[in-house]
Image (cartoon, rainbow, N blue to C red):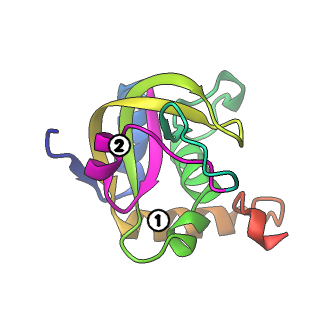
């Protein structure tokens, strides 16, 4: 595995999304272990899934001319609760890969081709500030436990 870069700002992450397609966010404490195992597990049933759970970063056409920086913030925000739930050391990783299936939450399951970057904690803080500045209570993390 090549050594990933560290993304230190939303602007840097947005630039990466402008440059590349087929990128995903994976929340993990140990990406090398994840890649060695090659699969995620359904936390409800324990079933092995055929790839790693991840979330797509590609900007969708319906996003229009809205800022890519805001798209990136939203994608980080959507599953930011995983950092808290899974404990210390869990980070957001930017991966390139190919989709091999869908998980129980309809999330893409991927085979990782490359660990592109680690998202620095400062980027997570910047994303939360940007999301909060939108003034919408409808934009909460996709957290099952909070309901």
Q: Which residue is mark 2?
A: 37
Q: Quadrant of residue 37?
A: top left
Task: In the rendered structure, find residue 124 and report the number of the disc placed on it.
Answer: 1
Q: Is residue 89 above or below residue 79?
A: below
Quadrant location, the C terminus = bottom right
Q: Is residue 62 above or below residue 14?
A: above
Tell me the distance, in whole angstroms, between the alpha carbons under discs 1 and 2.
27 Å
Q: Is residue 71 above or below residue 113?
A: below
Q: Label 2: few (<14), some or many (≥20) within 10 Å?
A: few
The answer to whether 145 appears left or right of 94 in the picture is right
Label 1's element? helix
Q: Point out residue 5 in the picture as x, y percentages from the top left corner.
A: 21, 48
* Tag nearer the camera, 1 or 2: 2
8 inside magenta stretch: no
The answer to whether 82 appears left or right of 138 in the picture is left
Q: Earlier in the sequence, mark 1 or mark 2?
A: 2
The answer to whether 73 appears left or right of 12 in the picture is right
The magenta span reads: 22-43
């Amino acid at each position: 595995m090549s050594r990933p870069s560290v993304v230190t700002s939303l602007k840097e992450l947005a630039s990466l999304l402008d440059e590349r397609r087929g990128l995903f966010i994976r929340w993990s404490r140990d990406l090398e272990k994840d890649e060695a195992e090659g699969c995620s597990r359904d936390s409800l049933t324990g079933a092995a899934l055929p790839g790693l759970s991840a979330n797509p970063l590609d900007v969708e056409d319906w996003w229009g001319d809205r800022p890519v920086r805001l798209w990136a913030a939203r994608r980080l925000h959507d599953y930011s609760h995983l950092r808290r739930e899974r404990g210390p050391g869990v980070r957001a990783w930017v991966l390139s890969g190919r989709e091999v299936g869908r998980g129980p939450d309809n999330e893409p399951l991927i085979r990782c081709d490359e660990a592109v970057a680690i998202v620095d904690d400062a980027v997570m803080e910047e994303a939360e500030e940007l999301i909060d500045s939108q003034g919408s209570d409808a934009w909460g993390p996709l957290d099952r436990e909070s309901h």
